[in-house]
Amino acid sequence: MLERNNIYLGDSYELIKEIPDKSIDLIVIDPPYQIDGKPKSKEALENTKNEITKGINKLNQELMDNHICDGIKEEIFEEFMRVMKVPNIYIWCNRKQIPMYLNYFVNKLHLNFEILVWNKPNVMPLYNHQYLNDVEYCLYFRGSNVCNPKCYDDARTVFKNPTNKIDKFAFHHPTCKPVNIIEKLIKNSSKENDLVLDCFLGSGTTAVACKNLNRDYIGIEINPKWYKIALDRLDGCDANGQQSFILR
Ligand SMILES: C[S@@+](CC[C@H](N)C(=O)[O-])C[C@H]1O[C@@H](n2cnc3c(N)ncnc32)[C@H](O)[C@@H]1O
């Protein structure tokens, strides 16, 4: 059985089976995105003068190198529903994944839902008569009585927050989420001492947010590099093992 206030190195598709039925108050996850098609090779890019193609390719290559572009297997959705006391789950995703999640949680299970947005005012100016890549989506699926924003500002559905350069620099993870946004989600949808699961933990953002807010957590991460960084981060150190200059 997985214990509270621990993070585990392993495959969440397997480890989640060790979590008892109806034991989790809230799930907050940021699973791999679904990115179709391979990035262009270095040689092909050397011949392109298009800075936008180069920029997008660099981002995709970083995600591919870190196995953060293979999407999520739908088989785990049933496990999410099994371990939660009542449906209460935030899922970060990219645009392509929205229909799959809505199909399962809304069309099939008829849950309430919100589409929350992290808007980044300072994204790279990769404009070529196309919309900017300046938002990330977070879907929220819930039953009744689990969401209770305490003030008008906490009830907003758009989080205006610059790209997360400081945390990325400190913890090296290419898709590190801002702690303040994750804290807002957790505060709105859980109480002190509740148990929060993040089974795609990355650099440990959800666990750190739980610690800051007196929530218990269980984290699972498959990549030993991110697992170690998350462990150190929970001890107040950055990716170089230095005491983190920012309290996160
Ligand atoms: C988008 S990142 C999460 C980043 C995280 N939100 C943060 O702030 O650092 C997804 C993470 O899921 C991990 N992952 C992918 N497949 C997994 C699996 N089967 N079990 C556990 N972790 C997995 C990846 O290694 C990656 O670190």
Image (cartoon, rainbow, N blue to C red):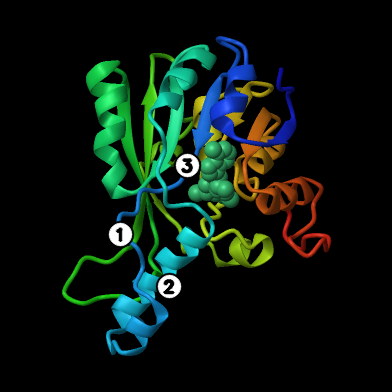
- For image coordinates 40% across by 36% down, the residue present is 155
Distance CA(mark 1)–CA(mark 3): 18 Å
Q: Quadrant of the N terminus?
A: top right
Q: Which of marks 1 and 3 is nearer the N terminus?
A: 3
Question: Which circle, 1 or 2, is nearer the viewer?
Answer: 1
Of the residues shown, which amino acid type is indicated by label 2?
Lys
Ligand 1 closer than 8 Å to the CB at disc 3? yes
- Residue 124 visible? The answer is no
Residue 64: horizontal and vertical position, in percent? Answer: 46, 59
Quick one: label 2, few (<14), some, or many (20+) residues within 10 Å?
some
Question: Cα distance, mark 2 to mark 3?
Answer: 20 Å
Q: Residue at x 65, y 45 (%)?
A: 204
Assign a secondary structure to mark 3: loop
In screen coordinates, is 143 left or right of 182? left
Circle on res. 31 = 3
On the image, which quarter does residue 160 sit in? Answer: bottom left
Dot 1 surroundings within 10 Å: few (below 14), some, or many (20 or more)?
few
- Give whichever of 80, 76 is nearer the camera: 76
Q: Quadrant of residue 8?
A: top right
Residue that badge 1 annotates: 37
Give the structural element (helix, strand or loop) at label 2: helix
* Residue drawn at x 79%, y 56% as measured from the top left: 237
Q: Nearer the viewer, residue 102 or 138?
A: 102
**Residue position marked by numbered label 2 in the rendering:** 58
